[in-house]
Image (tube, grey):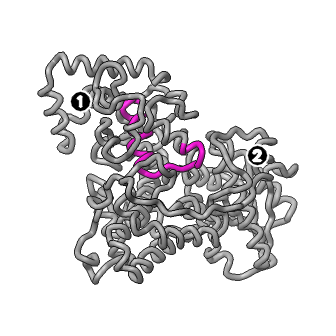
Amino acid sequence: MKTLRLILGDQLNHQHSWFEKTNSDITYVLMEVRQETDYVPHHIQKVAGFFASMRAFANEMQEKGHEVIYWKLDDPKNKQSIPENIDSLIEKGNYKKFEYQLPDEYRLDEQLSEYCQTLKIEWQAVDSEHFYTSREELASFFERKKTYLMESFYRHMRKKHNVMMDGKDPVTGQWNYDKDNRKKLPESVKIPYRNSRTNDVSGIVEMIESAGVKTIGSIDAQNYRWPITRREAFADLDIFCKRFLKNFGNYQDAMTTRTAFSFHSLVSFAMNVKLISPQEVVNTVVNYWHEHSDEVDISSVEGFVRQIIGWREYMRGIYWAKMPEYATLNHLNHSRKLPSWFWNGETKMNCLHHTIKQSLDHAYAHHIQRLMITGNFALLAGIDPGEVDEWYLGIYIDAIEWVEITNTRGMSQFADGGIVGTKPYVSSANYIDKMSDYCKACHYSKSKKTGDKACPFNSLYWNFYDQHRDTFDKNPRIGMMYRTWDKMDRDKKAELLQQADYYLKNIDKL
């Protein structure tokens, strides 16, 4: 039967069962469309990365003998809408069946499901064959439970997939080494060299700019660094294992102006477009550890595995369990607009200046920069979670809604009321200074809570807890904060709240 199969930009899975055999009756279609470039302003490196990897995937498919149609963004036949393009192809190609892989984003899942109801030909949706879990597995695991505790899901995943297990118990007898993953990066620790790439995406960038696509950030188009092929993804993973895994555990939470990438793997983009699977990543790292256990500590391996088999699968499960309502949650009723300097990094707060500039330059920041610098500030300042979502979804190379919104609206902004996190992740300057070298070169003083050049995080921190006392007063993980607040002198408390109010009224000038 003559069949048209759609491959979305984040479905570049060479290992999918679709591709085991070639069949002249089956045609695959990939398309670059304004529908996908325009729903938020994306980083130029993200748009270029998707298009470059899609084109490379299509070329490799053709080389293997598959029939492939590829519509570039500027193709005159391109109607810039997935359903309209499929309609056109079905009509002209006389296809008798349409097939697609289940999308990972709710909006695309709904769009394609509704579109297929209009088709007069046979159609079928199949699994993307990428994740450890099905869409429904997490919801089923937590059925009739009050809380969605990630740690219990993580242990379930370790057992089910026999990852770092000794029978029914974890190797070494300890499940989690999180307490060993929180060290500041000392000057004495050298950060290894990363190989630079020379992928030239200048043609793609010129096309994007000519089309008038609104993007953010900058790009070195002739030396594009993100992996766009499966081979490059494995090369990055190999470099991570050999040069960075040894120190990943100790310093995965550390923040520094010395490097944009620290000891992180940089494989999230490749995983999220499915060039490489989470199983392949986990197995590669665990196997490397088995072969180099005298060099690599288990805390590094477990910390890395937890990010993938734990958080990544957990966040996807939350997404499918709670969408579409999840995208509207605003438990704390925050409504302030995102400061203008979130789009250019021009703020006197060095931690935010560095993190935002790094994000604009590289389309990347690691999880603690996202959670405890940009996310921390947005939560303390009462920014509308919808605006925070849009910023995170656009600026990061690896941001696709299923993983972005649960981390942002849930973990970072507590907008879900505690589904993902049992407490808000906020801090004063003390934590930032403890985990980074940002504070020593800052315009503001980390030790000052009020007065000239007092660090905004300090007064905003206490203002946040004061403003939301009705919400958090009975939270057992926060009780100590309120006891400290209640012991403060009344005038001191008033001074802190006044300082915070001044900063919030002048937020664009911070």
- Which corner quadrant holds the N terminus? bottom right
The answer to whether 281 is drawn above or below residue 44 in the figure is: below
Q: Quadrant of residue 182?
A: bottom left
Q: Residue at x 41, y 33 (%)?
A: 442
Residue at mark 2: 208
Q: Residue at x 42, y 18 (%)?
A: 505
Magenta region: which residues? 358-382
Ranked by sequence position, the earlier of labels 2 and 1 is 2
Amino acid tagged 2: Ile
Number of other residues with Cα within 10 Å of mark 2, as a class: few under 14, some 14 to 19, many 20 or more: many
Q: Quadrant of residue 96?
A: bottom right
Q: Position of residue 9 (x, y in %)?
A: 66, 58
The kind of secondary structure element at disc 1 is helix
Q: Answer left or right for 197 relative to 343.
A: right
Magenta-colored segment: predominant secondary structure: helix
Amino acid tagged 1: Arg
The answer to whether 466 is drawn above or below residue 231 in the figure is: above
Pick the residue in front: 257 or 171. Answer: 257
The kind of secondary structure element at disc 2 is helix
All told, the count of numbered labels is: 2
Residue 360 painted magenta: yes
Q: Residue at x 62, y 77 (%)?
A: 17
Residue at mark 1: 469
| Whether residue 433 can be seen here | yes
Residue 163 painted magenta: no
